[in-house]
Amino acid sequence: MPRFAWSGAFTVFALVGTACGDPCGDAEDRSVALSELPCEMTNADGVWESHPLPPIADEDEECYWLEFRGCSKYEIAHPLGRVPTLVVGYTSFDQDGSFSTVGSGNSFVVQEASASTVTIRNAQNQFFYLRLVLE
């Protein structure tokens, strides 16, 4: 009888494990062109921002932060013309960036920086909105 109990328990465990599916089912690896960031700006000190800080009015919907899907890699274009010395990402659960925090850990991983792009990864299975600042 114990052999059947272990066999049954293993079968149940296997079925439950496969029922959970892929935790990264909504992953998205993509390139983000500057044309997709209509509110991007570079200030007088040469600091580039992909999106403004909150508050963002509802009529400025095109300025909402970039969707940053879980388990995804984004290659984001920038106009600096040089490799940035500082890459900072802010993440929020709200598209207008309210209640944001500096991205850290595996929710904001810098993979590569060049004179025209920065490649970042959200290695968590968590959906965020993203603001990128390069210096």
Image: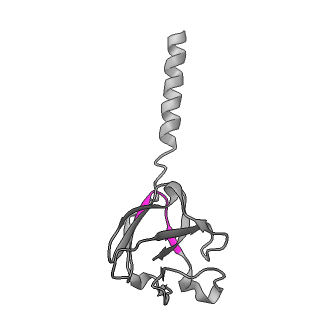
* Residue at x 50% of width, y 37% of height: 17
Question: In which quadrant of the rendered image does the C terminus lie?
Answer: bottom left
Q: Which residues are magenta?
A: 66-74
The answer to whether residue 83 is left or right of residue 10 is: left
Q: Is residue 103 visible?
A: yes
Q: Quadrant of residue 99?
A: bottom right
Classify residue 121 by image quadrant: bottom left
Does residue 134 lie above or below 70 as drawn? below
Is 75 rendered above or below residue 11?
A: below
The quarter of the picture where the N terminus appears is top right
Q: Number of marks in the image?
A: 0
**Frontmost residue, 131 versus 15:** 131
State the residue lying farthest toward the top. Answer: 1
Residue at point 42%, 64% (across, down): 120
Residue 127 among those drawn in magenta: no
Reply above or below: 66 against 16. below
Which residue is at the front of the view, 49 or 62? 49
Q: Position of residue 44 (x, y in %)?
A: 49, 90
Residue 59 percent across, percent down from the top left:
62, 89
Q: In terms of secondary structure, what is the magenta stretch mainly?
A: strand
Can residue 125 be seen in the rendering of this structure?
Answer: no
In the rendered structure, does residue 69 fall within the stretch colored magenta? yes
Query: How is the model colour-coded?
Result: one colour
Q: Residue at x 41, y 72 (%)?
A: 85
* Vertical placement of residue 113 versus 105, above or below: below
Q: Residue 69 in the image: x percent, y percent?
A: 49, 63
